[in-house]
Structure formats: C-alpha cells, structure tokens
Amino acid sequence: MNMKKQSGFTLIELVMVIVILGVLAAVAIPKFIDLKSDAQTAALAGVVGGINSASAINYAAKSANSLKGSTTTGLTCSTAATAILQGGITSGYTLDAVTALAAGANTCVVTQTAGGSTANATILGI
C-alpha cells in the first residue's frame, strides 16, 4: 500500500497563529490609535452642552415665574454656572470668575484643566 503524506497545517497550529495575532493586535492597536484627545473633546462638548441647557431652563423658569430659577445677572460665569447646575461645575473644568454677566446672552469660556482645551458656553443673564 502506497500512502501519500499530506502536507499542510494542523488545526492546532492554525488556532495558535490566530491567538498570537489576536494578542498582538490587542497590544499594538491602542498604541497606534490615540483616543484620549477625542474623548477630552467630547467631554468638553458635553459640559458646555450641560451649561447651555441648564441656562436655557433657568431662563425659562425665571421668565415664567420670578420666584423660580436663579438670578444670574451680576454674577461671574463661574458663580452663575454653579447656581444653575445641579451639583455645580464638573470637576476638571473652570469658567471665568472675573467678568460679571449682563442681561441677555453672555459668552463664558469653559476651560478643561487637564487638557487645556477651551470652548464657549452661553449663560443667559436674567
């Protein structure tokens, strides 16, 4: 009987290669893709959006009933944001603590202390 020897890879060898490639991909890919800056930008946008929304809700509440909401005219951006946000300003972010807000729309600069990025929030003075 003449048996031919088959050549090729066994299933175990193929599985081991796939496992090794998977481990290399899991270790190497995060080093090539830096998601930190994208995450910081998205977090800053979230904080700014929260301030803008809280300001709009506060303005509507104060306009509808003068006993509701917080008066923000004459306050600094930082103090006004603390007054209108439940729980105050998120840690890791600062707002201008010098300029007093006027009636109407005021632009406040939100600074991300860790990343140094800035974005503008609108606080309505009322």
Image (tube, grey):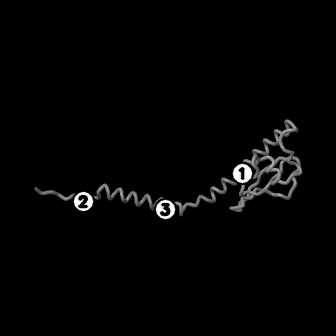
Q: Which mark is residue 101?
A: none
Q: Is residue 62 left or right of residue 119?
A: right
Instruction: Return the x and y of residue 34 as percentages of the image width and height.
Output: 58, 61
Q: Is residue 110 left or right of residue 38?
A: right
Q: Secondary structure at mark 1?
A: helix
The three-letter amino acid code for the residue at tag 2 is Ser
Sequence-first disc among 2 and 3: 2
Q: Secondary structure at mark 3?
A: helix
Sequence-first disc among 1 and 3: 3
Is the C terminus in the top left, top right, bottom left or bottom right quadrant?
A: top right
Residue matched to label 2 = 7
Residue matched to label 3 = 27
Q: Quadrant of residue 32?
A: bottom right
In the image, farthest residue toward the left: 1
Q: Residue at (76%, 46%) from the top-left corner? A: 86
Q: Which mark is residue 47?
A: 1
Badge 2: few (under 14), some or many (20 or more) residues near its Cα, within 10 Å?
few
Instruction: Return the x and y of residue 78 as percentages of the image width and height.
Output: 81, 54
User: How far apart in space, not on screen, are marks 1 and 3 (Cα)?
Assistant: 32 Å
Q: Residue at (75%, 52%) from the top-left corner? A: 89
Q: Residue at (85%, 54%) from the top-left corner? A: 76
The three-letter amino acid code for the residue at tag 3 is Val
Sequence-first disc among 1 and 2: 2
Q: Quadrant of residue 110?
A: bottom right
